[in-house]
Amino acid sequence: MKILSVYDKEFARYGHVITGYDLSELLETLDRISPLPEGTEYVPGNPVLEALPIAKLLAVNEYGGMPIQIGWCNGHNTKMNCLEYHRDSEVNLGTKDFILLLAKIDDMEDGKLDSAKVKAFFCPAGVPVEVFGTTLHYAPCSAAKGEGFKVLVVLPKGTNGPKPEMTPLNDEDKLLWACNKWLLAHRDSNEAKAGAVVAIEGENIDIAPDLK
């Protein structure tokens, strides 16, 4: 699979590189307090990260005053498995290089996504990116063989929390998997086995052969 860069012009459909922030303390704290598991671990919010001065700056400047949560997605991964989207943008920042597998909501046809539409983007360590709310994304991938990742995840407060009680009114409602989290699963994923809607067709992308 061709791996593009977040600095390539093609990334403009999916997100953009954020500039103007001093994120050194945030990176150091994330690296110090968060584990690096063999699988993947997602933590929606962490009080130590959210108490840093940069948290208020991100809430005001990046999210226009909305309450936010700052957590992480850490571990080792090379597969797509699922894709998700939110009603808002997500900010990612890695202590190490990482790769994002991305598509767009408008790449879907009749409620399904062909995995051939998914593209891979390399994000260097220390470079913050905004992933637009209309971008399908999921857990980061390792950028080198045997390497893990520690990726900061900033989202509006409550995102990925418990799924609200609801009666589905349309097909999109059936994709709601958690608070502010609409999920498309590949049939081979654990999420599909747990009941998530199988909405990704084609290959379950694995970038392991493309890593050095």
Image (tube, rainbow, N blue to C red):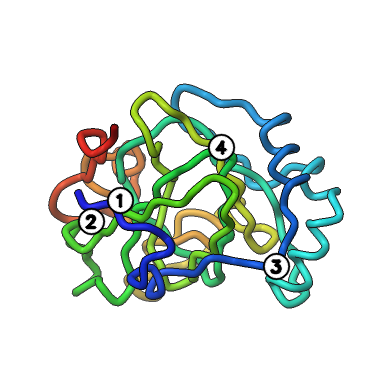
Q: Secondary structure at mark 4?
A: strand
CA distance separating discs 1 and 2 = 6 Å
Q: Is residue 119 above or below residue 147?
A: below
Q: Earlier in the sequence, mark 1 or mark 3?
A: 3
Does the residue at mark 1 contact the one at mark 2 (Cβ under 8 Å)?
Answer: yes
Q: Which residue is mark 2?
A: 200
Which is more foreground, mark 4 or mark 1?
4
The amino acid on which the numbered mark 1 sits, given as a three-letter code, is Ala
**Taking 13 as reference, is 96 above or below it?**
above
Nearer to us of marks 3 and 4 is 3
Mark sitting on residue 174: none
Which residue is located at x 54 percent, y 35 percent?
A: 74
Disc 1 designates what residue? 185
Q: Report helix, strand or loop for mark 3.
A: loop
Q: Horizontal placement of 82 versus 42: left or right?
A: left
**What whole-number distance in Å separates the C-alpha atoms at marks 2 and 3?**
37 Å
Determine the secondary structure under disc 2: strand
Q: Which residue is mark 4?
A: 150
Mark 3 and mark 4: span between their CA atoms? 22 Å
| Disc 4 crowd, CA 10 A, few/some/many (<14, 14-19, 20+) | many
> Disc 4 vs disc 1: Cβ atoms closer than 8 Å?
no
x and y, in percent, of residue 100 in the image: 39, 51
Mark 4 or mark 1: name the one nearer the start of the chain: 4
Disc on the earlier residue, 3 or 4: 3
Seen as rendered, the residue at the extreme left is: 202
The tag earlier along the polypeptide, 1 or 2, is 1
